Amino acid sequence: MYCFRSHHLSLADHCRIVWAGPAGRKRNGGIKPFKDMTVPELKIECAARELDVDERLMRKELQQNLRDHIKGVR
């Protein structure tokens, strides 16, 4: 049921989501531009996407916020 209700994303939509942040524009050499990012890179990426960038958040929480926002798009 979830698949039938979900919105289909085109290739242009995928590109728009990835290129919305600085890591997607800078890391154009692979299919996983958000893998192995450092904490400062994660904070910059989350701030560019207007996500929560609290100073108390650790790497795992920042990665989870970004992962929830991009929803598996590569």
Image (cartoon, rainbow, N blue to C red):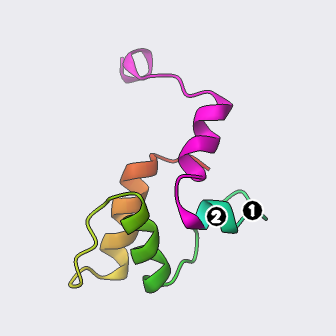
Mark closer to the chain start, 1 or 2: 1
Q: Amino acid at mark 1?
A: Asn
Asked if the residue at tag 2 contacts the one at tag 1, i.e. Cβ–Cβ closer than 8 Å, the answer is yes
Residue 62 in the image: state x and y as whole percent: 35, 71
Of 33 and 17, nearer the camera is 17
What residue span does the magenta drawing correspond to? 1-22
Q: Residue at x 57, y 77 (%)?
A: 36
Q: Amino acid at mark 2?
A: Pro
Q: Residues within 10 Å of mark 2 (few under 14, many from 20)?
A: some
Please tell me whether mark 1 or mark 2 is closer to you in this view: 1
Q: Residue at x 58, y 69 (%)?
A: 35
Residue 28 marker:
1
Question: Residue 7 magenta-drawn?
Answer: yes
Q: At numbered mark 1, what does the secondary structure look like: helix, strand or loop?
A: loop
Badge 2 is on which residue?
33
Q: Could you give the CA–CA distance between mark 1 and mark 2, rounded to whole angstroms? A: 7 Å
In the rendered structure, the answer to whether residue 29 lies left or right of residue 74 reads right
Of 58 and 46, nearer the camera is 46
Q: Residues within 10 Å of mark 1 (few under 14, many from 20)?
A: few
Residue 14 in the image: state x and y as whole percent: 60, 39
In the rendered structure, the answer to whether residue 3 lies left or right of residue 64 reads right
Question: Residue 65 magenta-drawn?
Answer: no
Residue reaching furthest to the right:
29
Of 17 and 3, nearer the camera is 17
In this rendering, is residue 4 above or below 38? above
Please identify the quarter of the rendering in which residue 16 is found.
Answer: top right
